[in-house]
Image (tube, grey):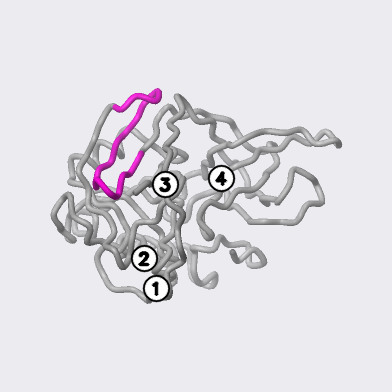
Amino acid sequence: MVFGTRTENWQGRAARSPRSCRTVLLASLVLLAATSMSAVGAAPAAAVTIVVVKPSQKLAVLFRPHEALSRPFRHAAAAYYVRARRPITDERTVLPILGQKTSADGLRWLHVELPGRPNGRTGWIRKRATVLATTRWHIVIDTSRRRVIVYKHARPVRAFRAIVGRPSTPTPLGRFFVEESIRLRPGAVGAPYALALSARSNVLQQFEGGSGQIAMHGLANVGGTLGSAVSHGCVRLNSAAISWLAAHVGPGTPVTITG
């Protein structure tokens, strides 16, 4: 986290222009699956053994930046700074809600999942300047079977074969969410779409100012055989599958990665 500079920990150099930042972030996102990056010792990831798919998930749409605190209390320690808009698409930030609480001083709080390192970070934000929404979608990525299963109303509606991270750069396990949906130009790595996830690689820490963000994206200009484990952590799908996902699920959609 780079709280003092009012940036999220995946953004990289704060001094860059917004346009150049978005270019760098997008490059670091999709190139996780295509090029070599700086690697450090892998942090152990706890396996998800039970997948709970709820019929719906409440979401918070942010209309201003928020300080995420460690507790639902005005003077609690700041845990994170959440931008109101996503760095690549400039769409509004959408966070899954884990709970709600009204503190003794009458302030209303939301317990939300947060993007960035460490994986699985949560915090409390003020309910003010948010709009509540709901999604009925849930994506489950099974790295052992190398399949993506899509649920609606807790019922499976689609299943796709996928490429996942190789053993040395595995796709991180845990509970995450879609940060933003990005339409890529035809010549871009991972076209036609990328779903940027809140997950970060446990092995690849940085690349060109990015922080090893995990995405689901297409096969264009990167290739690979569906059903294999050859990526640097991202999840690759064929064009039809990723296009279907981009058309149906949006920011805030829960993503469970198990193996």
Between marks 4 and 3, how big is the CA–CA gap? 15 Å
Of labels 4 and 1, earlier in sequence is: 4
Q: Residues within 10 Å of mark 4 (few under 14, many from 20)?
A: many
Instruction: Tell me whether the residue at label 4 lies in contact with that at label 1, contact meaning CB atoms closer than 8 angstroms.
Output: no
Instruction: Tell me whether the residue at label 1 lies in contact with that at label 3, contact meaning CB atoms closer than 8 angstroms.
Output: no
Q: Nearer the viewer, mark 4 or mark 1?
A: 4
Of labels 1 and 2, earlier in sequence is: 2
Q: Residues within 10 Å of mark 2 (few under 14, many from 20)?
A: many
Between marks 2 and 3, how big is the CA–CA gap? 15 Å
Q: In the image, residue 150 lies at what x, y percent?
A: 31, 34
The residue pinned by badge 3 equals: 180
Q: Amino acid at mark 4?
A: Glu
Q: Which stretch appears magenta?
A: 140-156
- Inspect the magenta stretch and tell me whether residue 148 lies in it: yes
Of labels 2 and 3, earlier in sequence is: 2
Q: Amino acid at mark 1?
A: Glu
- Inspect the magenta stretch and tell me whether residue 79 lies in it: no
**Is residue 70 placed above or below 246 in the rendered structure?**
below
Q: In the image, residue 186 lies at what x, y percent?
A: 19, 54
Residue 28 badge? 2
Q: In the image, residue 63 lies at what x, y percent?
A: 60, 41
Which residue is more in the foreground, 53 or 60?
A: 53
The residue pinned by badge 4 equals: 113
Which residue is more in the foreground, 41 or 61?
A: 41
The residue pinned by badge 1 equals: 208
Instruction: Tell me whether the residue at label 2 lies in contact with that at label 3, contact meaning CB atoms closer than 8 angstroms.
Output: no
